[in-house]
Image (cartoon, grey):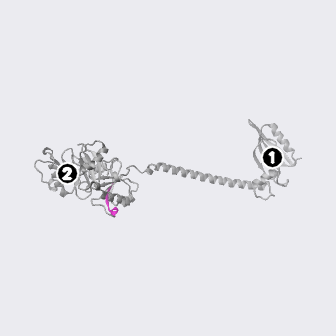
Amino acid sequence: MLIVLLPEQPLREGAAAQALNWWRMERDGAVQASGQDTLAALRQRFPAERLRALAPAAAVNLFRVRLPAQRAAAARVALPYALEDLVSQELDELHIVMGPRRSDGQVSAAVVSHTPMRAWLECFRVAGWRLEALLPQAALHADQSPENALLVMPSPWPTDSQVLVLSAQEEPVLLDPSLAGIWINRRLAGLEPQAQKMTLAGLSADELGLTLPATVEVQQLPEKDHLAAALLQAQRSTPAFNLLGGPYAVSMAAPPWRKMRPALIAAAVALALGLGWLTGEHLILSQERDSLRAEIGRLFDRSLPNSRREDPVMQFRQVLQGGTQISSSSGMGPLLHAFFVVLKEHDNAQVQQVRGSLESVVVELKVASFSELEAIRAALAAQPGVSENLEGADSENEGVTARIKLQRGGA
């Protein structure tokens, strides 16, 4: 998955060519690679990756409000009216997204103007990206908030110098260092004296320009890496905040065609194999057809050497039916004619194989019994100009298989 951080400055026309900070994440949350590139360059490098974007903290305001409604649908309807006194713009100019209910019972909310939302989505569309989720940058640190007091640290994000302030009673904020002191003093002033505690991690009060009253308890801690935890939150299957809701809603599921891709690939492979098999069968049958035609031609030339070859199959049929006058002194046509004239009288006889030359024909046939075989031999011997000779006979369960050789000559 790719995660990109949108810039602090509003995106303008041609912003798709602006270099953005990005991270390529492993499934386990580890950072595989990171850098700065344009959306178009990322599209060329990682065309198959899923993409999520982080909306900069300067463009998205995070709030916590108390809503009497417990049902999510009713709370979502009441949320804009609960925020009306907290925002400076008209409600119809703002995109409001309800977040999770916090441990103190308050409901979190993200508010962003429609203008940057449209600009961001247009840049992704121009670059050819299908954006899966748009997450508020600061909201990714909500799980790192202390149980009581304020936690102040440098921003872990690779942008201009900012200060990250975490509180148990408020949503996380990323502030300019020049404004951090004012914001922290105001936040501490709203707390009870016993709750006025602050933890500084990697910063000092002097760096922030803080003048703290004596009632504030300050604790100093070493700075930790909070970026990895924030990126892991951005990778969650169901993030707490997703600005792509309401009029900007998109399905976070894979496109329908992507779910069908294995089935489509299998169907394509099966179709390719089927076409290959049909092509192979066509070639084999074509070769067998050509071989059969060549064999018929050679058989015609041997059997009817004095005949002109036009339609060998039809000419053979005419010879066997006696429809063509052919010299009895050449070819095996007269021998076959004599044989099949006799065979017409024996319905149970079956021809198994015929082998012949200009002088003789060997016919392998199957008959019901030896008596029927002798009747066929007697009928052949009675044919003028034909002599027959039994070359072999085998008795089987289903009848008798015999080989009879026919030659010219005889009575």
**Nearer the observer, 8 or 61:** 61
Which badge, 1 or 2, comes first in the chain's sequence? Answer: 2
Amino acid type, mark 2: Val
- The residue lying toward the viewer, choosing from 280 and 263, is 263
**Residue 406 in magenta stretch:** no
Alpha carbons under labels 1 and 2: distance apart: 111 Å
* Residue 7 percent across, percent down from the top left: 29, 59
Determine whether the residue tagged by mark 2 lies in a helix, strand or loop: strand
Q: Name the residue tied to disc 1.
A: 340
Residue with the mark numbered 2: 152
Outermost residue, right side: 411
The circle drawn on residue 269 is: none
Q: Is residue 369 visible?
A: yes
The amino acid type found where label 1 is placed reads Phe
Q: Residue visible at 83% across and 42% down?
A: 377
What stretch of residues is rendered in magenta? Answer: 14-23
Mark yes or no: residue 332 visible: no
The residue depicted at 14 percent of the width and 45 percent of the height is 192
Q: Quadrant of residue 3?
A: bottom left
Task: From the top left corner, tell me how far across and down residue 328 is, in percent.
Answer: 85, 53
In-image side of 224 versus 319 (left or right): left
Q: Residue furthest bottom?
A: 14
Tell me how many marks there are. 2
Check the image and name the residue furthest to the left. Answer: 214
Q: Is residue 15 magenta?
A: yes
